[in-house]
Amino acid sequence: MSSTNRNLIGGRWVEARSGRTFTSVSPANHDDVVGEFAASSAEDVQAGVEAARAAFPGWSLLPAPKRGEILFRIARLLAEHKEELARLMTREMGKVLAEARGDVQEAIDVAYYMAGEGRRLSGQTVPSEMPDKFAMSVRRPIGVAGIITPWNFPVAIPAWKLFPALICGNTVVMKPATDTPACMARFVELLIEGGLPDGVVNLITGSGGEVGDAIVAHPDIRLISFTGHTDTGVEISRRAAATLKRVSLELGGKNPIVIWEDADLQLALDSVVWSSFGTAGQRCTAASRLIVHRRIHDEFVEALRTRVAALVLGDGLDELTDVGPVINDRAVERIASYAAIGRNEAELVIGGEPARDGKLAKGSFFQPTIFANARPDARIAQEEIFGPVTTVVPVDDWQQTVEIVNSVKYGLSSSLFTRDVNLAFRSIRDFDTGLGYVNHGTIGAEAHLPFGGTKATGNGHREVGQAALDFFSEWKSVYVDYSGRLQRAQIDTTFVDQG
């Protein structure tokens, strides 16, 4: 990976114009330096945009099936290098190896799915209201896309955005999170090895304040796809409006798992542990609220406490580890501040402190934490914490449950555990979220269905599936009139003699 400390611009790995660099370190051990990376500026973004613009005519005119063949090769390369990418990911951002492998597998799945779309980028053919006239719609590429990705899924989320952008014929300027530049650099190396032409994808590393702002402001970037903090998404939307960019925002979540009195409690426990503490709770779909029927509340909380007490906290590269570090010490401080708030709002069941003993001393670790008997309007039950913390809220009836599920400003994912098929379908109807699960946790979206949420979770666009193609392409309606005469749509041709 000798070239991964540089930007990729127009097919060449180059240093930042300023010559400045920044360091990526492992959150499990801050003495482990993953690498030095280009600390770029608006100058580097300008170079990346110029390269993407130059590559756009050739890439957009390459038949979509041929673009798909390149994505098929990339999918195979990702599969061949899955373990390498997973280990790099665990080292750089901390999630345990099993989850890191799943992250890479998501990218593989999306690559295969979008490669197939190259042979069916379908529009519509419909009957015209006039004789001897043909009507259809087709998809067209838009231009240069700016893609800004987070650190928590450093391969999967770039793939969600990049592969639909490419299959639609766009070229790309990408900025990874400053916490995970090595993952993105290796990912992009495999794109190039798979045969992606020079300039089609350009990688610019650096801070959001310099690189991110420059991408959003650049007049030749036609669309922005961003995943990250809600406040940042709002600011991107505001700034992008000045150049009328199309913007897709995937933002926060405060996702509930509802556990009804008739639930399979062992299945619910398994799912809660995975959904709440997987990736150390650093998922937009993490189950940070548990809404539990009061009749089983105490039994469930005690069973969950026992399960969480047995979780092993440590380096994700150790196969015995259940929960890895959080991304950095700033995250530890933020989570600790919420734990302090929670002590005044609810009953602390377990955890609530940073973990700094023994092998954990050099990393950014926080104890898996449960609060119980919380009010629905408590801050820890309303605000996104983004760490290994979940809050249990007791409920008495279905109407109260629906109100609590929908009481937060986010609407990404929800889950219900019940044996009652009627309640299952009511949850699908009543819970205001973009993802809904029954007898399954709040995580586990699949590549062929749209991913995204309602309310402050985003601005209405969706990732992956067919829905992603709508964001990364422009619709063009086409009419072919072979009547040989002027036909005027919507003009009344009926003549009435008024005498």
Image: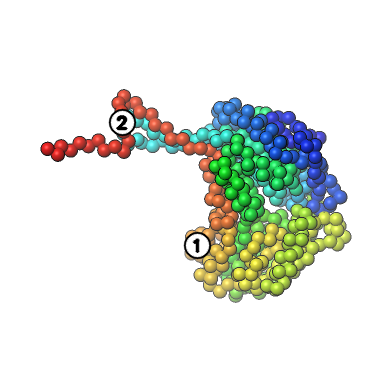
Work out whether mark 1 precedes mark 2 in sequence or the reverse, and give the earlier one: 1
Above or below residue 303? Residue 54 is: above
Secondary structure under the numbered disc 2 in the rendered image: loop
Q: In which quarter of the view is residue 36 placed? A: top right
Amino acid type at mark 2 = Gln
Image quarter where the N terminus lies is top right
Residue 165 position, x and y percent, is 59, 38
Above or below residue 453? Residue 135 is: above
Which residue shows up at 74% across the image and 68% down it?
340
Which residue bears the numbered disc 1?
A: 430
Separation of marks 1 and 2 at Cα, in angstroms = 48 Å
Above or below residue 304? Residue 246 is: above
Looking at this rendering, what residue extends furthest in the front direction?
242
Which residue bears the numbered disc 2?
A: 487
Q: In which quarter of the view is residue 300 placed? A: bottom right
Residue situated in front as seen by the camera: 331 or 78 = 331
> In this rendering, does residue 426 appear at all?
yes
> In this rendering, does residue 309 appear at all?
no
Q: In which quarter of the view is residue 59 placed? A: top right
Which residue shows up at 46% across the image and 35% down it?
476
Secondary structure under the numbered disc 1 in the rendered image: helix
Answer with left or right where residue 35 lies relative to residue 41: right
Residue 248 position, x and y percent, is 58, 46
Residue 247 position, x and y percent, is 57, 45
Image quarter where the C terminus lies is top left
Residue 422 position, x and y percent, is 48, 64
Rate crowding at label 1 as few (under 14), some (14 to 19) or many (20 or more) other CA atoms within 10 Å. Answer: some
Answer with left or right where residue 219 lies relative to residue 24: left
